[in-house]
Amino acid sequence: MEIWHIIVGGILLFFLYSWISDKIQAPRIKLQRELNICKKEKKALEEEKASLEKHFIQNYNVESDLRKSLDTLTEELNEAKGVIQKKIEDGKNILEEYNNKLIKLQKTNDELLKVIHEKDSYYKAISEKKNDEIEGIASLYADHLLLQYDITSKYLRTKKRPAPKTASDINDFKKDAKQHIEKYRLMKYKYDALFAVFPELSKYVEDFETIKELEDYNDVVNLQEQFDRSQYFLEKEEYEKLNEEDRNQLALENYINKHQKTNWQIGRDYELYCGQFYENNGWEVEYCGMEKRFEDKGRDLIARKDGVTLIIQCKYWSKNATIHENHICQLYGTAIEYELKQQQNKLLTETIRPVFITNNEILSETAKAFANKLGVDIIEDFAIDESQFRRIKCNIGKNKEMGLTKIYHLPYDQQYERIQINTESGDFYASTVKEAMNKGFRRAFKYRRIN
């Protein structure tokens, strides 16, 4: 029994100890937990504090940098203001200088316009053949040539030991000389005007013997009809001694090799060469520039083939020249005008393309850019190959007096531009006079005659 009481007592003591221990340890555990929580919160607060300190330092540094940047920008702004202010002042000075120059240029321009107006009045007087005005020009020209007389006369009158008698004599000489010069200039103006109207006369004034030959003609019209323009390209001895074939052939060769062609002849020949190139390649060609001249609307050639129409402009210019975009725009505009007219007349059944041809590579870069944008075809460096160029027009026509006529026309004949070659009617281009004559063609008896 005692053992059992001991065991029971021990168990009770164990449970009592455990209960008392729990009662004692519970607050301690709670406090330990709260302490741990406080430690964690303290650590979090310390970390937050460190983060805040770090952000504060960063923000402080940023603010410091911003202040420095702001100070730098303020300095730069002030410096820029100073530069701009200086430029404004410089600009005002330059503008004032330009305004002064503009005023001077305007004054110079007004003076030049006045001179040009006077010059135009002189040219107009010459072109209109106004006798009074031309006499004034002759007098002005004489005064210009005799200026030395006035200078000498003034010197003789004003030198240390004046010579008034000699000065007076010089003035008299000047008056006589001026009358002779005026008469000569008037005669020269009339002489040149006469040759401008009747160039054929230039071959009959070399000497008095040739002047006498004019007695063989009834009037100037008769002279023009009988005058052979081959004489312009031959020496008198050559023209008189050579037979017709050799004479005309040599004149043609001299014309081709002549460097003093007019701009019209150069441009016309180049248009014909370009036209023949297209004809040889199966195109039907209309020669607008040659036949219509200033009424061609910028269309030198119109070529048609297989439902395509080419509006062609030909430019034969020197290598030193430059073709600018205005020529491209003109060609494009005239092609559009042609297309609109065809649409208006309900005739538009083909594709229309503008083509620009030149003998050298002289288009500006801007002109090429315009051509590319506007769809204008460019053919550059298209020079004349004389071996392929047939200049003689052989035309079959009808005449009331003579019936069927076969006439060849040389490039300098008066009706050359008006003659249209229709290959279907037997017309053709010849390279030599012999070729034309071998096929039964001859030059016109009257060189002004239209066959």
Image: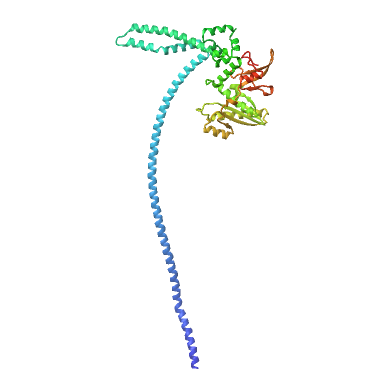
Along the line of sight, the residue nearer the viewer: 6 or 171: 171
- Quarter of the rendering containing residue 25: bottom left
Residue 297 visible in the current orientation: no
Give the quadrant of the C terminus: top right
Give the residue drawn at x 59%, y 30%: 355
- Quarter of the rendering containing residue 299: top right
Task: Give how far across and how far down residue 115 sits, in percent.
Answer: 45, 18
Outermost residue to the bottom: 1
Q: Is residue 214 above or below residue 308?
A: above
Number of numbered discs visible in the structure rendering: 0
Task: Give how far across and how far down residue 224 sits, in percent.
Answer: 59, 12
Q: How is the image coloured?
A: rainbow
- Quarter of the rendering containing residue 367: top right
Task: Give how far across and how far down residue 392 sits, in percent.
Answer: 61, 21
Task: Give how far across and how far down residue 415 sits, in percent.
Answer: 61, 17
Q: Is residue 373 above or below residue 38?
A: above
User: Is residue 16 found left or right of 214 in the rendered image?
Assistant: left
Give the residue drawn at x 44%, y 71%: 34
Give the residue drawn at x 45%, y 11%: 139
Along the line of sight, the residue nearer the viewer: 105 or 272: 272
User: Is residue 79 found left or right of 357 in the rendered image?
Assistant: left
Give the residue drawn at x 50%, y 89%: 8
Residue 45 visible in the current orientation: yes
Outermost residue to the left: 160
User: Is residue 135 found left or right of 249 in the rendered image?
Assistant: left
